[in-house]
Image (tube, helix red, strand yellow):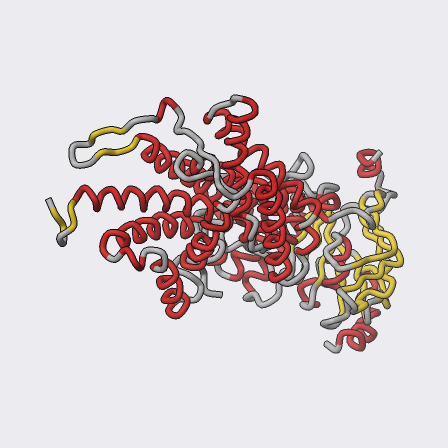
Amino acid sequence: MEIFGIPLQAMLGQLLLGLVNGSFYAMLSLGLAVIFGLLNIINFSHGAMYMMGAYLAWMMMEYLGLGYWWSLAAAPIVVGAFGVLIERVLIRHVYKLDHLYGLLLTFGLALVIEGVYRDCFGVSGQPYGVPEALRGATNLGFMILPNYRAWVVVASLLVCFLTWFVIERTRIGSYLRAGTENPRLMQAFGVNVPRMVMLTYGFGVALAAMAGVLAAPIIQVSPLMGSNVIIVVFAVVVIGGMGSILGSILTGLALGLIEGLTRVFYPEASATVVFVIMALVLLLRPAGLFGRES
Amino acid sequence: MAEEHMRDARVPALAISGLQAWYGESHILHGVDLEVRPGEVVSLLGRNGAGRTTTLRAILGLVGKRTGSVKIDGVEVIDAPPHHIARLGVGYCPEERGIFASLSCEENLLLPPVVKPGGMSLADIYAMFPNLEERRSSQGTRLSGGEQQMLAVARILRTGARLLLLDEISEGLAPVIVQALDRMIRRLKALGYTIVMVEQNFRFAAPLADRLYVMEHGCVVEQFAAAELAAKMDRLHEYLGV
């Protein structure tokens, strides 16, 4: 069977690949959106945190013999704690300054972290195996579905949905939404806003670390993996609208799929299509597709 | 100790002395002295820019910098962060109301954490403000101006705060709503709340207050009891230009 002269198998394969990439975009841009909403910090070190998550998985396997599932649980906690430390020691000092300072600080931080990992592990990248339980593929009749990729899509959708649910539908989430709007008033009500900000940053980077572990068996674990993906993720955030939770999830998935489709129909444009869309969105709707016009 | 103080009527619910406050480089309060006894309703009068709103914000530590002394139930809080001060039982209703657009009416109502036992229940609040129950699932900022003002006051009654700082609650509201607010303040007073009101609307504030303070250029320039009001009217006209 063919669609517009493209074999269905190839098309579905690329769509799946797009969906997997989209899942990573969604998880990463979700963390960025949560952090930007409350902290007003454009967290350029997000990619480095994603890389740290993947490396932690690799190191746990290499040095401690602990497998994938251990890493999936430990990486968000360890990298989240590292994020909390970074927030306490560095980032909190730039809240009162212009956005630019936060951006420069976190960008510098990303360079430092990447540099350290490059120094320790080189740039060639380390292989990380697919966990035993998720090896192999399932024949769906119309396509062969690799189990691990299906797991990545399901797991990240689940994490995204849970995050959305907690923020939009629970009491803790109402604190976060209110704190995003008016942190001073929240503090005047007796809420410990500095602690909330610290934990939010930790949570945002924990999401990035988890995405890193999910990505480890699919791509080469390398110190550069963060900077490779982060520029696209920032384009996703701009398209979805800064600070919009649902917007970042949906835009992440949609752009992954669009990239996949472009790879089928016009492969030369697949690396740039996201940025073309970003330019169009910025021209037509500067606040982003889901952003509130201010 | 704090609990004992609260029951002791001789310890002021709020005692401010020599309070100075700054926003960035601008020096707004130049040594405010003010005392509110438990259960009292006190009104801060003055022209725009006299420093009344800043006084309320400085009590909670919401200004850039402050010096002097602020005691809540005898506890010094000049160096405490805002969330610690709120936890001593202070409820704040800001001039701009501060209703959250991303929260529904009921979420706004339930947002401020409970700081002391003995606050009103949701049912008490809905009995007092039936409109809010009708609009419970509406987006907070879709409520009418009067409803938003009710909501801004109602949400701090749930928290168990006993010292209420109310900033211009009658501002820009229709007379019928102002009357409802009048009844509400009388109810709260009867329930033993201590209230500090900043008001531009002299006709609304004067009949409610036990004592009145007049501020000018970041200082308290006059204070008198409600009983002296008639005798002070000429001076007040001068201060307020009303």
Residue A78 in percent (x, y) is at 59, 33
Q: Is residue A134 above or below residue A52?
A: above
**Where in the figure is residue B119, as x and y percent of width and height?**
64, 39
Residue A202, percent from left and from top: 59, 41
Q: Is residue B82 above or below residue B239?
A: above
The residue at 81%/68% (across/down) is B27
Q: Position of residue B203 (x, y in %)?
A: 68, 67
In the foreground, A221 or B94: A221
Residue A239 occupies which quadrant of the picture? Answer: bottom left
**Left or right of A16, for residue A70:** right
Q: Could one spot residue B127 in this view of the protein?
A: no
In percent of the image, x 45 and y 49: which residue is there? A229
> Which quarter shows the N terminus of chain B?
top right
Q: Residue furthest left?
A: A1
Q: Nearer the viewer, residue A25 or B197?
A: A25
Residue at position x 74%, y 59% in the image: B63
- Position of the C terminus of chain B, as image quadrant, is bottom right
In the rendered view, tell whether residue A172 sits above or below residue B177: above
Location of residue A128 by image quarter:
top left
